């Protein structure tokens, strides 16, 4: 007798016989809960969102759905998803790949099981250490992963300490010196870094990013410079603005939570607001954005996008890659920063668009295995050179 788990998996593979389909239907009719379980596990969008919540709660290695979507009949449609654990507690390591393409006006798809033997000759593990460095105003470097809990440096009356959770905290005991700056550098291939500034605001900085900031905010405005990506929780202070510069823009807030992306290799600079209010300015214009909105600055112009899924924007902070509406070069840029890779394309870059999320704690080979079954091929060379064939 097949288990309900097996029937649901066969339904996902589209290999149910008529008798098996009837057995599953009978089980679903026994209760609303049974029906809800099957419907949720059979709906790719709900499955992706549910696994995102599960991954953030339990830190399991979860592949959520990665799928291509494009109206262009010349573009491949590649719906992909992998599941390593179901929401109902079923323990099953299953990798299902649904590959589809438009061919002569018709959408054709097939489901295959990916062979687990496909591995890179030289694999790369996800970052396990925080390789971040704080450069003090006198040029001294503090390597976060190398220092122990407690005070690691003193600048004026400001104590810089490492907390038990690995964060760096600036404790202002009444600053009596001139304006001094520190710089936090989070290199490619490093775990993200968390820093609490002297005003109590917390900044979480992504790999491949830097932040320059004052040791103490003794001036009226609180200002930092960011290159790369950071999530910022600003402590409210009605008398002092918090100002972020980077990517040709200035973002001003009083107290709020927002994400800023100013990576130089990205086409646009993006500020996404989670709560509060933010003013984003360029040399030519300024925009006010509200929660769920995103200011996008590129090619000398700024636009505001509404209805943004903020959980996808800050997925990196929660241990996930975000592939929502990303084309292959954007996906590879995320991978290159996290795994510290040099990505080289050998031939024409395929026009593939993805959506979905996946855990950032996976080995590179696990990530590339799914992309392989989307029709891509890879070769790893010395010096972490990843060749996309």
Image: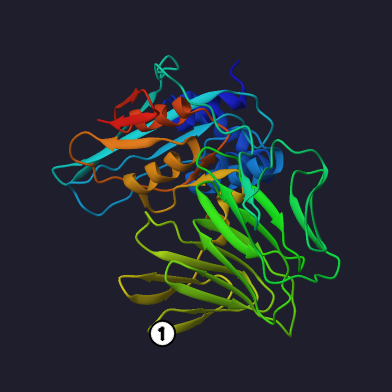
Q: Residue at x 42, y 48 (%)?
A: 355
**Rendering coords of residue 185 (x, y %):** 57, 50
In screen coordinates, is 191 left or right of 379? right
Which image quarter holds the C terminus?
top left
In screen coordinates, is 202 left or right of 345? right
Q: Is residue 52 above or below residue 226?
A: above
Residue highlighted by disc 1: 285
| Colouring used for the render | rainbow
Front-most of residues 295 and 14: 295
Do we see residue 237 in this rendering?
yes
Front-most of residues 314 and 68: 314
Q: Residue at x 56, y 28 (%)?
A: 23
**Rendering coords of residue 111 (x, y %):** 36, 29
| Total tally of numbered discs in the picture | 1
Front-most of residues 241 and 272: 241
In screen coordinates, is 215 left or right of 66? right
**Quadrant in the picture for residue 269:** bottom left
Q: Is residue 47 above or below residue 170?
A: above
Label 1 Cα crowd, 10 Å radius (few <14 / some 14-19 / many 20+)? few
Which image quarter holds the N terminus?
top right
**Rendering coords of residue 343 (x, y %):** 34, 37
Q: Secondary structure at mark 1?
A: loop
**Rendering coords of residue 25 (x, y %):** 55, 35
Q: Is residue 234 above or below residue 286?
A: above
**Quadrant in the picture for residue 336:** top left
Q: Which residue appears farthest toward the left when viewing the image?
A: 104
Do we see residue 14 in this rendering?
no
């Amino acid at each position: 007798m097949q288990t309900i788990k097996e029937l649901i998996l066969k339904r996902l593979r589209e290999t149910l016989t008529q008798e098996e389909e009837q057995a599953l239907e009978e089980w679903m009719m026994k209760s609303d809960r049974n029906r809800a379980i099957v419907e949720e596990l059979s709906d790719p969008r709900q499955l992706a969102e549910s696994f995102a919540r599960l991954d953030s709660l339990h830190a399991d290695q979860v592949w959520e759905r990665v799928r291509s979507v494009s109206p262009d009949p010349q573009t491949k449609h590649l719906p992909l998803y992998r599941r390593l654990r179901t929401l109902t507690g079923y323990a099953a390591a299953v990798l299902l790949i649904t590959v589809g393409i438009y061919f002569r006006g018709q959408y054709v798809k097939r489901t295959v099981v990916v062979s687990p033997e496909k591995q890179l000759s030289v694999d790369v593990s996800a970052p396990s250490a925080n390789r971040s460095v704080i450069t003090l105003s006198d040029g001294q470097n503090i390597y976060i992963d190398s220092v122990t809990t407690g005070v690691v440096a003193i600048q004026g009356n400001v104590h810089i300490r490492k907390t038990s959770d690995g964060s760096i905290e600036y404790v202002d005991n009444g600053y009596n010196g001139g304006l001094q700056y520190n710089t936090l550098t989070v290199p490619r291939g490093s775990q993200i870094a968390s820093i609490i500034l002297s005003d109590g605001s917390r900044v979480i900085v992504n790999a491949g990013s830097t932040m320059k900031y004052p040791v103490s905010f003794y001036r009226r405005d609180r200002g930092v410079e960011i290159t790369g990506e950071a999530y910022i929780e600003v402590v409210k202070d009605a008398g002092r603005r918090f100002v972020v510069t980077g990517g040709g823009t200035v973002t001003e807030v009083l107290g709020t939570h927002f994400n800023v992306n100013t990576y130089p290799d990205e086409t646009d600079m993006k500020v996404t607001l989670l709560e509060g209010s933010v003013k984003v300015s360029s040399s030519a214009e300024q925009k006010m954005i509200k929660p769920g909105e995103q200011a996008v600055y590129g090619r000398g112009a700024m636009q505001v996008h509404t209805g943004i899924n903020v959980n996808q924007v800050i997925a990196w902070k929660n241990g996930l890659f975000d592939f929502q509406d990303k084309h292959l070069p954007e996906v590879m840029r995320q991978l290159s920063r996290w795994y510290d890779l040099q990505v080289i394309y050998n031939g024409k870059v395929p026009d593939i668009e993805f959506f979905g999320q996946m855990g950032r704690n996976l080995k590179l080979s696990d990530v590339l295995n799914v992309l392989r079954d989307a029709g891509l091929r890879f070769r790893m060379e010395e010096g972490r050179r990843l060749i996309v064939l």
